Image: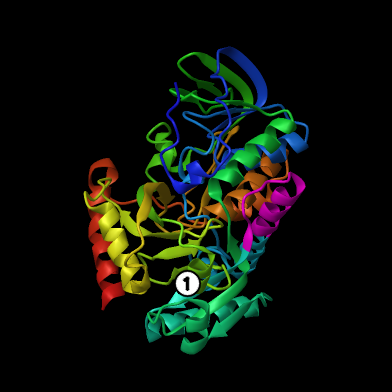
Amino acid sequence: MPKSYPRSWYADTADIPTRRPPLTGDVRCDVCIVGAGYTGLVTAIELAQRGYDVVVLEAERIGWGASGRNGGQIVTGFNKSIGTIAGWVGREDAVRLWHLSEEAKTILADLVDRFGIECDLHWGYLLAALKKRQMDELEAWREELAGLGYDRTRLLDQEQTRAEIATNAYVGSVLDEGSGHLHPLRYVLGLARAAESLGVRIFEGSRVLHLETGAAPQAETKTGRVLPRFLVLAGNAYLGRLVPEIAGRIMPVATYIIGTEPLGEERARALIPSGHAVADTNFVLNYYRRSPDHRFLFGGGVSYSGLDRPDLKQALRRTMLRFFPQLEEARIDYCWGGHVAITMDRTPHVGRIGPATYYAQGYSGHGVAMTAICGRLMAEAIAGQAERFDVFARIPHAPFPGGGSLRKPALVLAMMWYRMRDLL
């Protein structure tokens, strides 16, 4: 029996469907996808539109992992500058990767429009600087994007930022009209309905226990087996150690969100008049937005150790109040979290294992949009058009140092350094 969705504002405001049945017996198909989150479902849609017979295996419920719990923010570009990426893959391919990242947002918008996915999609995003150094970095980022032909950003000074966000915390910001936010669980459930309308078969409560990733791939669950021509691994942070070849190249990181009681339209609108999503530029960042029912959703505190703080709700509330002391009397109705996957280089990984197994993982905070392009690229590669997939696969796939036992302690120490850098 799959687990229920963790309690969250998302789960309480989504139209949760009845459980889909688990896999039973042997099933043959063209492509088997492991994981019914954004990556797996976009890949399934792209393949089904090309005429492929697709089966999706989900260990729990559709969107049960990061796809149904994240901050819902649609972010332009990568977590690294195009200049940094050019140092890895060369300028020409770095520019191609930039255009692929822009295509990701177009795919998302097209899916929402074409399949009528009601997910509160809103365009507009504010990247806010807490200190001059961060503002300088935002200006450099904006100039780099302008050099790539991206003209959807605007620099805001302290006064203009204060008009957009009801806090004195920031020295300035960049408004990006090409980024935005949505209701993540509604979006992933809408993707599932879209996939099924195209003939995709989705099995919930079907945890994969064994995989064959060679020339004759297969996926085995407790009650059945899928025998496909191609295999797609889309479990990301929740794939665990099932596939050792790629497990050491991502690190599951817990991130958390709180939601206030309904504040009323006037009070909620006063916090962020435009309704845009907001994030600061700390390495360990804070991100927030208001909801359609006039709550304030504030995300931040992370855990790299795998252990949740016992005072998690109170700690996030204290952080929120440093920015918005006017919410002192607001009750906290929700507190939830989940795991996202980061990579050493903080950019997504796509690749192959053997001749017939593909994977995408490690979105490092940019997964709402980036999953869309990665799904399309894997579908193109399976269909025999791998040129764009191979460009994306050139991003380095460095493993985390320390192996299975030491990589978490090493990352915790590294994050302590970055947290100190944010504070100083």
In the picture, which quadrant includes the C terminus?
Answer: bottom left
10 Å neighbourhood of mark 1: few (<14), some, or many (≥20)? many
In the picture, which quadrant includes the N terminus?
Answer: top left
Image quarter of residue 3 = top left
For image coordinates 69% across by 53% down, the residue present is 107
| Residue on which the image places disc 1 | 271
Most foreground residue, 75 or 120 = 120
Q: Position of residue 324 (x, y in %)?
A: 37, 72
Most foreground residue, 352 or 263 = 263
For image coordinates 28% across by 45% down, the residue present is 306
Q: Left or right? Give the position of 392 relative to 349.
A: right
The overriding secondary structure of the stretch rendered in magenta is helix
Above-or-below relation of 285 to 377? below
Q: Position of residue 233 (x, y in %)?
A: 53, 36
Magenta range is: 103-122
Residue 108 lies in the magenta-colored region: yes
**Label 1 amino acid?**
Leu
Residue 411 visible? The answer is no
